Amino acid sequence: MRTSVDNEAPTAERYRAFAEVEARGMSKTYDAWALGVAGDPATIALIDELPPAKRQPNLVFSAARFNGAEPAPYDAFKNWLREHWPPVRHTAETHATQTNEAGRCALHVPALAEIDGPLALLEVGASAGLCLYPDRYGYRYAGRERLDPADGASRVILDCETRETRGTAPVPVPTHLPDVVWRAGIDLNPLDVTNPDDLAWLDALIWPEHDDRRERLRAAASIVAADPPHLVAGDLNERLAALAAEAPGDATLVVFHTAVIAYLDEPARAGFVETVRTLPGHWLSVEGRSIVPGIRVRDDVPNDSTDFVLALDGVQRAWAQPHGRALTWVPNP
C-alpha cells in the first residue's frame, strides 16, 4: 500500500517495489520472498493467473500463509507455492487485504483529542472493526504517562514512539481517551472476529515476524466480540452518506480510514474526498503520502520513507508509522 506501483505494472516490478519500499526493514521473510518472485519467471507465471488487482504481494503471501506456508528461504517457499498453488489461488481470489491493526488507534488518539465529544466514529474499510475501539485500549506513548480507559486497565496496551526532534512539534498526547458513543463501519466484506475462519485470515495478514501484533489481534478481538460494532457491507462511496446519517445527532461524527484509499482508482478517491468533505463533523485520514487528493504533504518535517500522512480535515498533522508504532507531529505551517 505504500508503493506507487499500480495494478497494471508488470508483476516483477510490483514485487521488487514491495521488497524495496514496504518490506525492507519490516519483514525479512517478505523482503526475501518478494525479491525472489521478482526474479523467478515460473512463479510470476503462477501469480499472473490471478486478475491484476489480486496479484499484490501482501495478498498472495497472506493467502499462502493462510494455507500453511511457513517462513523459509525463498527456494523452499517457491517449491511449496507450486505444490499448493490451487488453494492459494482460490484464497487470493476470494479474499482481500483487510489488515485490521488495532495498534493504529495510537495514531488516531492524539487527533481525536482535538475534537469535542462525545464522538460517533465511522470507519471506511473497517475490516472487523478493531480500530473502532480507541477508548477500550491502553496506550504507552514514549516519555508520557500510560493512558488507560476510564473503567480501568485494558488487556490491550499499545506502544507508540513519539519522534520529537528538530523540525517537529511535540505529539499532543491527551490526558484521557475519547468518549465514543457510536461506532460503525463500511467494508466490501466485513469480517467477524467470532468466526474462526475470519480470525485466521486476519492472523495470516500479519507479517511473519510481527508476533506482538499477532498477540494484540487476539486480545483486541476479544474486546470487539464482547460489544460488536455496526458494520455494513458495500462500496464505501455508495454507503458512506447513508451510514453517516445514522450517527446520533448529539455526537460529533468522525469519518476515518487507514491504508484504505490506496485501493480505489483516482476517480473513486476524488469522489470519496468530495463526499466526506460535505458531511458534518470531521475527517481523519492516515494514508500513503501520494494517496489522498488535496493534502499538502509536509516533506519539510523529518520522516521515514515508509511513513503515512495523518491528516485531520484535509490538513496534515503528523507522519505516522503504518502499524501505529511511531508518530512525528508536524508544526503548524
Image (tube, rainbow, N blue to C red):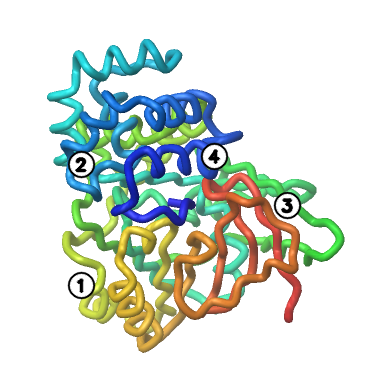
First along the sequence among labels 2 and 4? 4
Of badges 2 and 1, nearer the viewer stands 2
Q: Position of residue 11 (x, y in %)?
A: 33, 41
First along the sequence among labels 2 and 1? 2
First along the sequence among labels 1 and 3? 3
- Decide if residue 4 is on the left or right side of residue 190: right
- Residue at the disc numbered 1: 239
Taking the spot 64% from the left edge, 65% from the top edge, the residue there is: 318
- Residue at the disc numbered 4: 20
Residue 57 location, quadrant = top left
Q: Position of residue 69 (x, y in %)?
A: 31, 18
Residue type for callout 4 = Glu
SS of the residue at dot 1? helix
Taking the spot 79% from the left edge, 64% from the top edge, the residue there is: 168
- Residue at the disc numbered 3: 162
Taking the spot 46% from the left edge, 38% from the top edge, the residue there is: 16
Spatial distance from mark 2 to mark 4, Cα to Cα? Answer: 25 Å
SS of the residue at dot 4? helix
Of badges 3 and 2, nearer the viewer stands 2
Residue 301 location, quadrant = bottom right
First along the sequence among labels 3 and 2? 2
SS of the residue at dot 3? strand
- Residue at the disc numbered 2: 95
Residue type for callout 1 = Arg
Label 4: few (<14), some (14–19) or many (≥20) C-alpha neighbours in 10 Å: some
Foreground residue among 252 and 325: 325
